Image: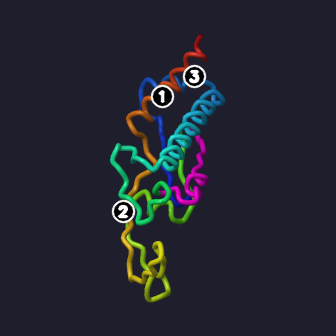
């Protein structure tokens, strides 16, 4: 997942860290695995539905509006994956273009004099394309509430 990763680190969260310390490593890893899977699902849902960004802002529309923005073929949504290591869960995509969609930026030709592409029936050649940021990985207020509810439910079941 070298193109784009978001790391959820539970160190320094006082109460949560203290509770995790009481869990055996397998229980802690199971909780983080469940949270990472939930973040992955939230991200995929955001991509399929066409937004909004985790902060609630709408994504700038695409030139072609036949499919939700960032979900033309579904490749980006299918690429979202996660890994758990220690007290951290990492969610991201290994696609080479994942970061440009998250952060925005300029795309320039590497070896040619211009970029060439088609939008609808129009053929375009240009020296640079500026991609707007369309953040899709991150936690909205609703996402955070869902994560807390999942964690609390898991911990309640363990300590009953």
Q: Position of residue 39 (x, y in %)?
A: 52, 40
Tag 3 residue:
154
Q: Quadrant of residue 105?
A: bottom left
- Helix, strand, or loop for circle 1? helix
Q: Quadrant of residue 29?
A: top right
Q: Position of residue 18 (x, y in %)?
A: 48, 24
Would residue 74 be counted in the magenta stretch?
yes
With respect to residue 29, does 112 lie above or below?
Answer: below
Q: Residue at x 58, y 56 (%)?
A: 74
Tag 1 residue:
17
Q: Position of residue 33 (x, y in %)?
A: 60, 36
Q: Residue at x 59, y 58 (%)?
A: 75
**59 or 20: which is nearer to us?**
59
Task: Please identify the residue farthest to the top as the structure is shown.
Answer: 160
Instruction: State yes or no: discs 1 and 3 in contact (Cβ < 8 Å).
Output: no
Q: Indicate which disc, 1 or 3, sits on the residue closer to the N terminus.
A: 1
Task: Please identify the residue farthest to the right as the structure is shown.
Answer: 26
**Numbered label attached to residue 132:** 2
Q: Position of residue 159 (x, y in %)?
A: 58, 14
Q: Quadrant of residue 61?
A: bottom left
For marks 1 and 3, give the CA distance: 15 Å
Quarter of the figure with the C terminus: top right
On screen, residue 118 versus residue 80, left or right, reads left
Q: Indicate which disc, 3 or 2, sits on the residue closer to the N terminus.
A: 2
**132 or 124: which is nearer to us?**
124
**132 or 64: which is nearer to us?**
64
Would residue 77 be counted in the magenta stretch?
yes
Q: Residue at x 42, y 83 (%)?
A: 125
Question: Nearer the observer, disc 3 or disc 2?
Answer: 2
Q: Residue at x 35, y 50 (%)?
A: 58
The crowd level at tag 3 (other Cα within 10 Å; few <14, some 14-19, many 20+) is some
């Amino acid at each position: 997942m070298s193109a784009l990763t978001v790391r959820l680190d539970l160190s320094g969260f006082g109460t949560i860290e203290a509770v995790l310390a009481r869990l055996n490593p397998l229980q802690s890893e199971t909780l983080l695995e469940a949270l990472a899977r939930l973040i992955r699902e939230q991200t995929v849902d955001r991509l399929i539905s066409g937004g909004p960004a985790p902060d609630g802002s709408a994504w700038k529309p695409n030139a072609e509006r036949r499919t939700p923005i960032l979900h033309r073929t579904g490749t980006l949504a299918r690429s979202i994956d996660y890994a758990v290591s220690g007290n951290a869960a990492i969610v991201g995509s290994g696609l080479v273009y994942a970061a440009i969609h998250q952060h925005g930026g300029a795309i320039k030709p590497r070896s040619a004099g211009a970029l060439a592409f088609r939008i609808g029936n129009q053929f375009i050649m240009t020296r640079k394309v500026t991609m707007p940021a369309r953040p899709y990985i991150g936690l909205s207020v609703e996402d955070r509430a869902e994560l807390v509810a999942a964690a609390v439910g898991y911990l309640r079941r363990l300590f009953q």
